[in-house]
Image (tube, rainbow, N blue to C red):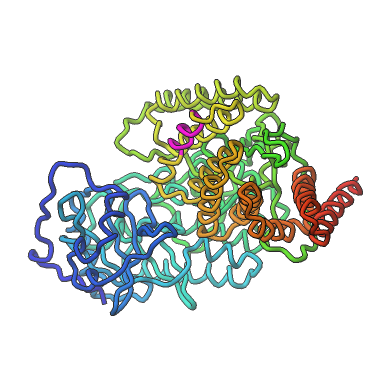
Amino acid sequence: MVNLAVNKAKFAEVQINKRSWPSPQDYNEALQNPAINLADPLLKVGKAGLNKLGLPKAITGSFASVYYLDCPQQDFAVRCFLHNIADQKDRYAKISEYLNQIDLPIMADFDYLDKGVLAQGQWYPILKMDWVDGQNLIEYIGRNLDNAKVLEKLRLWLRQARKTLKEHGIAHGDLQHGNVLVTNDSIKLVDYDGMFVPALAGLPSNELGHRNYQHPGRTKTDFGPHLDNFSAWLIDTSLYCLERDPRLWFTLHAGEDCLLFREKDLQDPYSSFAFHELESHPNKEIQERVRFLRSLLALPVEQIPDINSEVQTPTDLPLLDASKKKPDWLSSAQHLVAEEVEPSQPVYRTPVEPKPAHTHTHISNRWLNQQANLVNKPPSTDTFGSYIAIVLAVLFFTGIGLSIKSVNESHSTPAPAQVEQSVQNEQLLFDKGTEFYEKGDYKSALNYYQQALTHLEGAGKGKTVEAGNCNYWIGRMQMQVKQFNAAFRSLSQAEAIYNEVGLTSDVAKVQHAYGLIYLQEKKFPDAIEMFKSALDGFTHEQSSQYNEDCKADVSYYLGWAYVGNHQDKEATQLFLRVIDYFDGVTDKQPDYVVSRLQDIARYFKKHHQASYAKKATQAAKHISAFNSAKP
C-alpha cells in the first residue's frame, strides 16, 4: 500500500525562500549526511549509495535527482526535485489517495514528504519510494538482445501494464526507459510526477515527458487517460523490431537515452534516418509496424489508439523519399572523433578513412564480448554511403547521442523560423569544420567549430547537450594545435554540461581527453588518474557496445601511462586484456586495430616477454590477412 495520508498536516506549506531551487550538487552535499539533512526517521539512519569517489551516487534527470539509501529496515529511493512545481504536493495527494484504493502491483510504494531534505539551509520536499531492485528498460534490453522470447515477454508485460492502467483510468504520463524497471518476473513503473488519475481531470499536465518517447504534438493541455498511448506504441514497436533484428540496436545507436527513435525522428519522420532504415528493412513485418507508428504522428494526441486495440496502417500513408534521409550532426555524438597517441611518437595521427563494417563469425578469448567498429573521423553528410559506414561503427569515446534539448528551460525559445535558420547555420559551420579537420587543417577546423558554438549561444542554447558536444570538439582541436590550457577550459565546459544532465559516459570521454593531454605532456600520474576515472565511468554505465569498446580503448591508453610511470606489471595486465579484446575480431577498422596490436607487441619484445609479443603479433596478422583476402 502507498503510505501517504492526505491531510493538511501531512502537506503543510513548505517554507522556501526566494533563492534558486537546489541543484544536484546541493543534494549531493546533503545526502553525505542523512542523519542531519533528512527528516524522516527511517531515512536518517540510512547510508546513501556512493560512487568510486566516495560521493553520493545520483541518477539525475530533467526533474529530479534520485539516490539509493541503504536503511536498516529496508532500502529506499529518495527523489529530490530540481524544480519548484506549484501544485506538486496536491497532485501527489490525489495520486496517493487513488493508488491506495486500487493497490496495483506494478506501482512502487511511495511517500511524499513535505519536510524532506535540508539543502541551502532550507527544508525541501522529497519523495520516499520503496527501492526496486531491477534493471531499467535499456539495461534489460541490452542484456537480452540475443533472446527474442525474452524481448517478446517484456513487450507483453508492458502491454498488460498499459491495459491495467487503462482499466483504472490512469496514465503514467512519462513512459520511458528510466521509469520502467524490470525485476525477475515482472515490471514496476516509477516516477509519478506527471501521472494522471481521475481526480486530476480538468487540470493541465505539469510535464511533457521524455521527448524521445512522446508525440511531438503533446502539450500541457493533453492530460487524460489516453496520455500513454503514443509512448506505449513507440516502446512496443521498438521491441517488436528488435525481436526480429537485434542488430538494429547498434545500427541506430539505441541505448543512448532512447530506444530506436529520438525526438528529431518523431518531429520529422520524412527526413529521419531511423524511419528510413526501418521502413526499408528486408523484414516486411518491421516495415509495416514502423509505418503504422509513423501514421500516429499525423494524429492529435487524444486520437492515438490504445496499444491493445485492433489497428491498421492507413492505405494513403505517403512513402518515404530516400533522397530526403538525413544523418545526425551536433545533436548526435556520432560526429565526434578521437585522435590516437602513438606511444613511441607522442603526436596525434592523421585521420584514416573508415572502411565498411564486416560481421565476425567468431571471437575467441574476448575480455569484452560485443561487436563494434572503430572509426576516427566525423561523419560526412555529403553521401549516404559514407554515413552508413560510420553509423555502423562505434567510436571509442564518442558521447551519448541525445536529441537537441535545453538543460536550462528558462531560456527563451526563438521563433520557429529563427530556430530553423540557427540550426542551418550551426550545421553548415560544423560541417565546414569537419571538412577542414579531414584535411588536417586543425586551426581552420577549430575556427569553424567555435563559430558553431557562437551560434548556439546566440540562439540561447549555450547550455544544451549539443553545446557541450561542440565545446568538447573545440577542446579536441585545441589539443591538436597544442593549446593545452585552452583545451582544458573547453573540455571542462563540456564536462560541466554533461554533469548537469547526468551523462556519465560523456563525462568519462572528457576525462579520457584530459588523460590524453597529460600523456602527451608526460605527466603520467595525472594521466593514470584521469584514465582510471574514465574507465570507471564507462564501466558503471549500462552495458552497450559503445561502453564496451570504450573500456578497451581507455585500457590501452592507461597501459601506456603505466609504462611511462614505470608500473610495468599493471601495464602488462591491461595490454593482455586489450589483446584478448581484439583477438579474432574481423569487423573493426584494420589499420586502427593492427597498429595498436603492433604497439603492444613492440612493448613486450622490448621487455623480453616473447610469448605475449607473439600473441599480439598473431592477432594483428590474423586481422591483416582477413582484410587482405576481402574482395
Which residue is at the front of the view, 101 or 16? 16
- Height in image: 126 above or below 186? above
Q: Which residues are magenta?
A: 486-494
The tally of labels here is 0
Asked whether residue 195 appears in the rendered view, the answer is: yes
Is residue 106 magenta-colored?
Answer: no
Left or right: 597 in relation to 274:
right
Q: Quadrant of the N terminus?
A: bottom left
Residue 551 picture quarter: bottom right
Residue 40: x %, y % from top left = 19, 68
Q: Quadrant of the C terminus?
A: top right
Q: Is 338 displayed left or right of 55 in the figure?
A: right
Q: Residue at x 22, y 73 (%)?
A: 42
Look at the magenta stretch and give its main secondary structure.
helix
Q: Quadrant of residue 51?
A: bottom left
Q: Is residue 139 above or below residue 453?
A: below
Can residue 159 be seen? no
> In the image, what residue occupies the spot 58% across and 27% down?
482
How far across and down, in percent of the image, does residue 307 sit?
Answer: 47, 62
Q: Position of residue 377 (x, y in %)?
A: 67, 35
Is 488 covered by the magenta stretch?
A: yes
Q: Is residue 615 above or below residue 278?
A: below
* Residue at figure coordinates x 61%, y 42% from the top left: 273
Q: Is residue 175 left or right of residue 324?
A: left
Quarter of the image holding residue 224?
A: bottom left
